[in-house]
Image (spheres, rainbow, N blue to C red):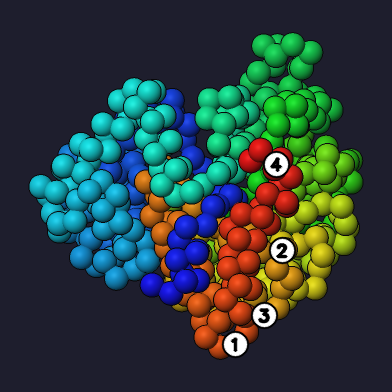
Amino acid sequence: MNPVMEHVLRAQTVDGHEHLLLPSERVRENTGFFEISHYIEADLYSAGAEIPLAGKHLEGNIDLFLAHYPHIKNTACGKTVPMIFELYGMDGGVNEKTLRVLDGKIRENSQSLERATAWYDEIFKKCGVAAALSVHSGWGNLCGSSREYPAIRPVAYLDFLLRRFQVEWLRRQCGSLPNLCGARFQDYLDYTENFLTRQFEGGVLAGKFGTPYWRSLDFGPPGGSAEAEAEYNSGEEAMPYFESFIFHYLLRRFEAQGLPVQFHTGHVTPAAADMPRYQLQWSDPSPFGRLAYQYPGLKFVLLHTGFPFQEEYFSLVKNIPNIYADFSWIPIISPMRAKLALHMALEMVPCNKIIGFGGDAYHVEALYAHLRAAKAVIGEVLSEKVRDGWFTEAEAKESADKILYENPREIYGLGAAN
Ligand SMILES: [Zn+2]
């Protein structure tokens, strides 16, 4: 193996984007093979499997999986299946018998908090992951992660604050939350501010929007509060002024707090997206050019390299100081596109603005497989850059350390202890 690839495989990593369950959540889920198959499921669905598989147990899905797996063995997601077998010390073929054995082994790591925590420790160590920034959805105790599993660092999911269902949820709390009626627009703004205060006090490292899953990234200019309030009171599902008003409010608050915000850009996974309404342009990162100048003190981390808008994406990252590139998820969509994107990034973008890895996964098995895919991409690209005379070997190794470890530490303000 060449020395650059060897260096990349050994490199310590700060993982910039995950959705990891805490060990206690894994125990509650009783995680098995189909629970960890979130992205594999997307390709099975595309291949014609009728039912989304996630969250279902082995018996209901094994036939469906075996019928469609041969169609997805070629895809980057499909190729994570043998990696998970290997992680569990199994290198035989994928069949009913081996799947049942694998499922049993995965579930053994979900049987108690001690067992799940030890498994997380093993994977984090094996992967050399020093910290993983992880988005927790909803409005519960988002910051519990720092206490339960210190290497999982919390990121606040923000989209729900823009949604009609959240407005209606708060209205139903009328009378049950102290000092909140839940009926008036001002109550909603107070609730939003209280949510943010809890996040900031709880030590979130960033916020995260998954906007293209339900609407366009183009919010337009900030809506006035009068229009936002009228929509809030209207009961209509679509609330463009309200959405824009809250969106800009959140950006201002994160800017004032000095915390970055992550934004999903590009390709969406069908299980989570509003597919019948979805339009590809919703994912186009172009509106961030304007936004970045509106909020010059806010770090905009654009996730997933914006595929299939990578040209627009890297043009933005190249030109605008407070827009950052993030390579989460893309290596398991297409290693070739990830390689092309990393070549483009290294040629176009200052090296301190590239975050090299995020597994975008709910389970540590997927983190492991996605990191393997990402390190193969990074190692190959940096080796090619040495072969082509773009980098010396020392420069290639230094670039690997920056994109995998130093940049995410710097961008998210992780202390020296991390
Ligand atoms: Zn994500």
Query: In 3D space, how far apart are the residues under numbered discs 2 and 1 (Cα atoms)?
Result: 22 Å
Residue 45 seen in this snapshot: no
The tag earlier along the polypeptide, 1 or 3, is 3
For residue 394, which quarter of the picture? bottom right
Q: Nearer the viewer, mark 4 or mark 2?
A: 4
Disc number for residue 353: 2
Name which residue type carries label 3.
Glu
Secondary structure at badge 4 equals loop
The tag earlier along the polypeptide, 4 or 2, is 2
Residue annotated with mark 4? 416
Query: In 3D space, how far apart are the residues under numbered discs 2 and 3 (Cα atoms)?
Result: 12 Å
Q: Is residue 405 left or right of residue 99?
A: right
Disc number for residue 389: 1
Q: Residue 115 in the image: state x and y as whole percent.
A: 34, 27
Q: Are marks 1 and 4 in contact (CB under 8 Å)?
A: no
* Residue 227 against residue 331 in the figure, above or below: above
